[in-house]
Image: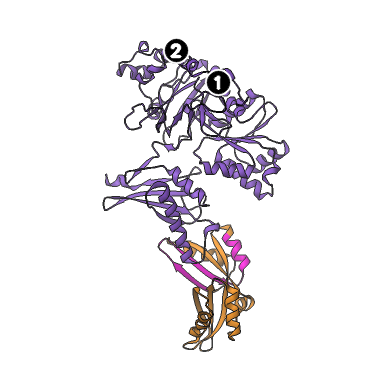
C-alpha cells in the first residue's frame, strides 16, 4: 500500500543538487514530490517520482548514494486544519513521525501528505481505520 | 616449530653466530662503499669515520645516515657501488613524491633478493607443489620481479600475471588452481570482492596463502582478506632502495615480520634526534645492507615507524621481528601534542564498516589544533532520516576519539569525491603550515 520514496545523499556543494536533477531529467523522470533536509555538510533529497527504476538506474550509474524507503501517502482536505487532522490520528495511535511534507493536488479540494514513520504499515492501518483515504503508488505516479 | 624454511642454516642460526656473520659482512660492506661510493665516503669523512673504525656490528652507530633526499640528489649514478658494466638491471620508485630513485642490481644482488623472497614464500607454506600467482606489477616496480624470482627459486609454478585485468586474474586463478597469491593488500581485497560478485564462495578457489605488501595495511584488512579469499594472509616488507620486497617477511605466527638479518642490519632511531633507541622502543627503522654490490646503503633512514622484537619466535627463526609499520615518519602528524598516523583513522573506518576512503584536514583555530575527517559515504550507512545520519557521524567521531584521544569533526562526503592522484587518495591536508 505504501509509496516508495527515493532519498539521495547530496553534498553541500554548489551544483550538487542540480547535477542529481539533471541526471534524472536525462532519464525522462518526472518528479511528483520533493523535499530536502539540510545539515551543515550535506542534504538529503527526498523525492517521489513516476519511474523508480529509471531513477535507480541513473543514480547507480553516477555512483550516487541513495536509499528507497516506504512512506505513507494520504489525502488531506485542502482546508485549514486538514493536515492537522491527519497528524492527530497518528498521534493518538502512538505513532511518531520522522518527517513529513505535503503538496496540493487541487487547490481548495485535495492535498497529498507524505509521512515518514518508523512502521509504515501500522501508520496506514491507523489512518485507514479513521477513514483517511490513502494514496497508492500507482495513483501517485499518475498525479 | 615448523619446517617451513628456505635456508634453515641462516634463518635459524643462533644470535651469536648471526652477530659474527653480520660483523664480518658489515666490515666488508663498509670497505666496499668507502672504495666505490665517493658521496658516502664524503659523509663518513665529515663525521670523522674511516673503515678502520668499523670493526663489527656494534660499531654500526658510528656511521652517518643516508636519506631518501641523498638518493634523490645522487640520481642516477651517485650511489652506484660497482662499475655499470657489472649491473644487469634497475628498478625504480614511482616518483610520485618527488624525483625518482633508481636502484641498481648485479646478478649476485638479484640472486640474494630472490632468496629473500623465496624465504617469504616458504614461510607462507610454499613448496615446489604450489602454483604462485603474482599479481604485483611487473616492470620498474620491484613487487612483481621480486616475488617472481622468489617463486622460481622455491620451484612453484609461477603465474606472472602482473596487476590489473581482474577478470583474467580470476580465470587463471580458477583454471590453473593458484594456491598462493602475491599482490598489494588493496588489490587482494578487490579480487576478493570481484570473486564474490561473480558468485564464488571463499572455498571455491584453491588458494591457501597470500603474500601482501608494498603499501600500508591494517590487521582489520588482513582479517577481511583472509575471510574473502579463505586464506592466511602474510605480510612482506621492503623498499625499492634496499632491493624490494623481502627485507622482512611473516612466518605462520603472523605476529610481525622477520628481518633477513644476514643481509640487512636493522636499527630503531628517534626520527627527530637520530639517537639509536633500545630494543622494543618505537621509532624509525634504519636499514644497512650487508652484502650489496651495486646499490649498497649504509644506515638508510626508511622513514617507517615500527618496533623490533627478539623474543624467541615459535617458528624457530632467530631473525629479529619488526611490527607492521604504523606509518611513515613523514606521515606522522602531531595534533594537540598527540602523535597521529593516518593508518589509525583507517583502522577505525574499516572497523566501523567504511571503505578506507578518507581525508584528514588539520587546522588551527584560536591557537588550538583542529582535526576534520572527511569520510566517503556508503550505501550501507546512508539513511533518509537526518537524526540517524547525525548519530552515525557522532558514532564515528567517538570511535576515532577512542583511538586517538582527540575528538575530530567528522564529515560524510559523496563517494569518490576525495581527490585521488594516480589511484592513491590524498590523505592528509595540513593547513597549519600557513600560520607558521
Chain of the residue under label 2: B
Segment tinted magenta in the rendering: A33-59
Label the orange chain with its letter.
Answer: A
> Picture coordinates of residue B82 (x, y %)?
47, 15
Q: Is residue B127 magenta?
A: no
Using the image, determine if residue B18 lies above or below residue B233: above
Label 2 Cα crowd, 10 Å radius (few <14 / some 14-19 / many 20+): some
Quadrant in which the C terminus of chain B is drawn: top left
Task: Report the colour scheme.
Answer: by chain
Mark 1 and mark 2: Cα distance apart in space: 23 Å
Q: Secondary structure at mark 2?
A: helix
Provide the residue designation for mark 2: B28
Q: Earlier in the sequence, mark 1 or mark 2?
A: 1
Q: Are marks 1 and 2 on the same chain?
A: yes
Q: Which chain is purple?
A: B
- Residue at x-position 58% and y-position 59%: A60
Residue in the image at 48% along x and 84% along y: A84
Q: Which residue is mark 1?
A: B12
Nearer the camera: disc 1 or disc 2: 1
Q: Is residue A48 above or below residue B368?
A: below
Residue B361 is left or right of residue B127, and the answer is left
Whether residue B426 is visible, yes or no, is no
The location of residue B331, given as percent across then percent down, is 40, 39
Q: Is residue B217 above or below residue A68?
A: above
**Residue drawn at (56%, 66%) of the image:** A24
- Is A50 colored magenta in this rendering? yes
Amino acid at each position: 500500500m505504501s509509496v516508495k520514496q527515493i532519498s539521495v545523499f547530496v553534498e553541500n556543494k554548489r551544483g550538487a543538487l542540480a547535477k542529481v536533477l539533471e541526471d534524472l531529467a536525462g532519464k525522462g523522470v518526472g518528479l511528483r514530490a520533493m523535499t530536502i533536509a539540510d545539515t551543515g555538510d550535506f542534504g538529503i533529497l527526498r523525492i517521489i517520482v513516476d519511474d523508480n527504476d529509471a531513477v535507480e538506474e541513473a543514480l547507480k550509474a553516477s555512483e550516487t548514494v541513495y536509499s528507497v524507503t516506504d512512506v505513507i501517502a494520504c489525502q488531506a482536505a485542502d482546508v485549514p486544519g486538514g493536515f492537522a487532522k491527519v497528524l492527530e490520528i497518528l498521534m493518538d495511535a502512538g505513532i511518531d513521525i520522522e518527517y513529513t511534507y505535503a503538496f496540493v493536488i487541487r487547490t481548495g479540494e485535495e492535498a497529498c501528505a507524505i509521512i515518514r514513520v518508523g512502521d509504515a504499515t501500522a501508520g496506514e492501518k491507523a489512518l485507514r481505520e479513521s477513514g483517511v483515504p490513502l494514496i497508492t503508488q500507482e495513483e501517485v505516479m499518475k498525479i | 616449530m615448523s619446517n617451513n624454511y628456505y635456508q634453515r642454516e641462516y634463518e635459524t642460526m643462533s644470535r651469536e653466530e648471526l652477530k659474527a656473520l653480520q660483523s664480518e659482512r658489515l666490515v666488508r660492506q663498509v670497505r666496499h662503499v668507502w672504495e666505490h661510493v665517493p658521496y658516502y665516503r664524503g659523509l663518513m669523512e665529515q663525521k670523522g669515520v674511516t673503515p678502520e673504525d668499523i670493526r663489527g656490528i656494534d660499531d654500526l652507530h658510528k656511521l652517518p645516515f643516508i636519506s631518501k633526499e641523498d638518493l634523490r640528489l645522487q640520481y642516477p649514478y651517485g650511489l652506484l657501488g660497482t662499475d655499470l658494466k657489472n649491473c644487469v638491471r634497475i628498478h625504480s620508485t614511482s616518483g610520485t613524491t618527488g624525483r625518482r630513485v633508481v636502484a641498481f642490481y648485479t646478478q649476485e644482488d638479484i640472486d640474494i633478493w630472490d632468496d629473500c623472497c623465496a624465504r617469504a614464500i616458504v614461510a607462507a607454506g610454499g613448496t615446489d607443489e604450489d602454483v604462485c600467482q603474482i599479481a604485483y606489477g611487473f616492470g620498474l616496480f620491484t613487487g612483481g620481479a621480486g616475488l617472481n624470482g622468489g617463486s622460481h627459486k622455491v620451484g612453484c609454478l609461477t603465474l606472472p600475471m602482473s596487476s590489473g585485468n581482474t577478470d583474467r586474474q580470476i580465470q587463471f586463478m580458477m583454471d590453473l588452481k593458484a594456491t598462493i597469491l602475491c599482490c598489494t593488500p588493496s588489490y587482494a581485497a578487490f579480487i576478493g570482492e570481484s570473486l564474490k560478485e561473480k558468485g564464488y564462495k571463499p572455498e571455491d578457489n584453491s588458494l591457501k596463502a597470500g603474500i601482501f605488501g608494498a603499501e600500508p595495511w591494517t590487521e582489520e584488512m588482513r582479517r577481511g582478506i583472509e575471510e574473502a579469499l579463505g586464506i592466511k594472509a602474510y605480510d612482506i616488507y621492503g623498499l625499492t632502495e634496499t632491493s624490494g620486497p623481502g627485507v622482512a617477511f611473516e612466518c605462520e605466527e603472523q605476529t610481525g615480520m622477520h628481518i633477513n638479518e644476514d643481509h640487512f642490519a636493522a636499527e630503531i632511531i628517534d626520527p627527530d634526534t637520530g639517537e639509536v633507541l633500545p630494543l622494543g622502543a618505537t621509532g624509525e627503522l634504519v636499514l644497512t645492507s650487508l652484502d650489496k654490490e651495486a646499490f649498497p646503503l649504509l644506515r638508510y633512514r626508511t622513514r617507517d615507524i615500527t618496533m623490533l622484537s627478539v623474543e624467541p619466535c615459535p617458528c624457530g627463526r632467530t631473525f629479529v621481528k619488526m611490527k607492521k609499520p604504523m606509518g611513515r615518519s613523514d606521515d606522522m602528524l602531531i595534533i594537540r601534542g598527540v602523535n597521529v598516523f593516518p593508518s589509525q583513522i583507517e583502522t577505525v573506518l574499516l572497523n566501523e564498516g567504511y571503505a578506507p576512503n578518507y581525508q584528514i584536514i588539520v587546522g588551527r583555530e584560536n591557537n588550538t589544533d583542529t582535526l576534520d575527517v572527511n569520510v566517503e559515504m556508503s550505501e550501507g550507512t546512508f539513511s533518509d532520516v537526518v537524526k540517524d545520519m547525525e548519530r552515525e557521524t557522532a558514532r564515528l567521531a567517538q570511535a576515532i576519539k577512542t583511538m586517538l584521544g582527540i575528538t575530530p569533526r567528522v564529515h560524510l562526503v559523496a563517494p569518490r569525491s576525495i581527490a585521488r592522484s594516480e589511484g592513491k587518495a590524498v590523505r592528509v591536508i595540513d593547513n597549519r603550515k600557513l600560520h607558521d
